[in-house]
Amino acid sequence: MAAILVAGAGALDLGLLAVTLTLPRALFAWFGGGWVDRHRRRPVLIGADLVRAVALLAIPAAAYWHAMSMPLLYVIAATTGVATVLFELADHVFIADLVGREQLLDANGKREAVDAIAEISGPALGGALVAWLTAPIAIAVDALTFVASALLIARIRTQEKIAAASAASSFVEDVRIGIHVVWRDPAIRALFIAAAAMTLFGSFMASLYTLFALRDLGLTPTELGIAIGCGGIGAFAGATMSGRAAQRFGPRRTLIGSLALGAAMQVLIPLAPPIPWIAMTFLIATQVLGDGVLTIYLINETTLRQRLLPPEALGRAAGTFHVANGLLTPIGALAGAVLAESIGIRPTLWLLAIGYAMALVSLIFARRALPVTTLLPTQLDPKAATR
């Protein structure tokens, strides 16, 4: 909004802004993964929060001095992108230090529930702040939340598990280890392939969903906002049920079942007719049910990775996932835009369901490697992924 309303950004400017926000995440993910494996995570979390706060505060400052420009926003987007990926990598490892591996499923579920509440309330609050205070001042409020986060994290006291001093420290070796621990274990490999497929094809929807809803289906911005907000409700419900689902059905059936339902729900998007009230029903069903079951999948997938992978390589393994995400997101968005121009938006969105089905197939082929029952502390083998 700041780019559009203050810097006069066009479509190409916004595309480049998205690239500068996501591409640095891919470039720094492996470096950051090795760093958080060998160093204390809490200072990284605090530092990343403070860097993002300072970077975001540059936007209202530039607006005050009438110096807002797209090059400045590109630099800020790249800076916040790097800080965010470092925070997420450190957070992925730090949570295991905080709660222990046996409590990861419960902890991840609670955190996803909080994220769902933010998804419900955040966009509406952000829009209200932009309307009330203008976009740059709203970003200043956002920057202060990162300061609050840093202060809260600074109060945490826990013993962190750091990789041995003899662990490899070169960037090339970090990359090799990150790929090795992900690819050698059949369960983690299947989760990685599934994540890559969903990221690539999910990027189609990210770039086309709004245009499809407003132009092809005839929804108003308010109606679209209501539909998207319902996704937060579904995600919250999924977060609260993720632990019970894993305990009742086991990780294998939970992962495959939730991904199957999530893939099936994606067909409702291209099936939505250009009749606004019916289209709203289709989109809300996708948001509530689809986001709900996919949240169950995400929580169990994250927990399984944290439990199966060796603790000393969690950061580098997460870096491998982040690199794939950071590279495939802009590729998918660009491919989706090109396909939409050539064959139309609705046919292109059918590929979203096909991509999710491909992710499901990767899990089905590797189902024997997925745990049947919830892993207990005595069953955890930190070296399993290296064999």
Image: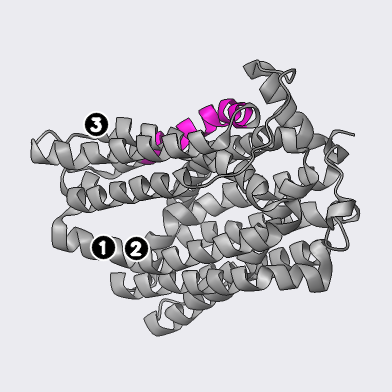
Q: In what quadrant of the picture does the C terminus appear?
A: top right
Q: Are marks 2 and 3 in contact (CB under 8 Å)?
A: no
Residue at which label 3 appears: 72
Task: Measuring from the top left, give residue 18's x and y in whole percent.
Answer: 38, 41
* Residue at disc 3, secondary structure: helix
Please identify the quarter of the rendering in which residue 34 is found: top right
- Quarter of image, res 14: top left
Task: Tell me where the magenta segment starts and ends, as one range.
Answer: 18-36
Asked if residue 187 lies left or right of residue 210, the reply is right
Residue 152 in magenta? no
Contact between labelled residues 2 and 1, with CB atoms less than 8 Å apart: yes
Q: Amino acid at mark 1?
A: Gly
Q: Would you name the residue on which mark 2 appears?
A: 123
> For the residues marked 1 and 3, what is the alpha-carbon distance in whole angstroms?
23 Å
Q: Measured from the top left, where is residue 171 in percent x and y?
A: 63, 18
Residue at (83% x, 40% y) in the render: 382
Q: Is residue 225 visible?
A: yes
Residue closer to the observer: 24 or 372 = 372
Q: Is residue 265 above or below residue 27?
A: below
Of the residues shown, which amino acid type is indicated by label 3?
Leu
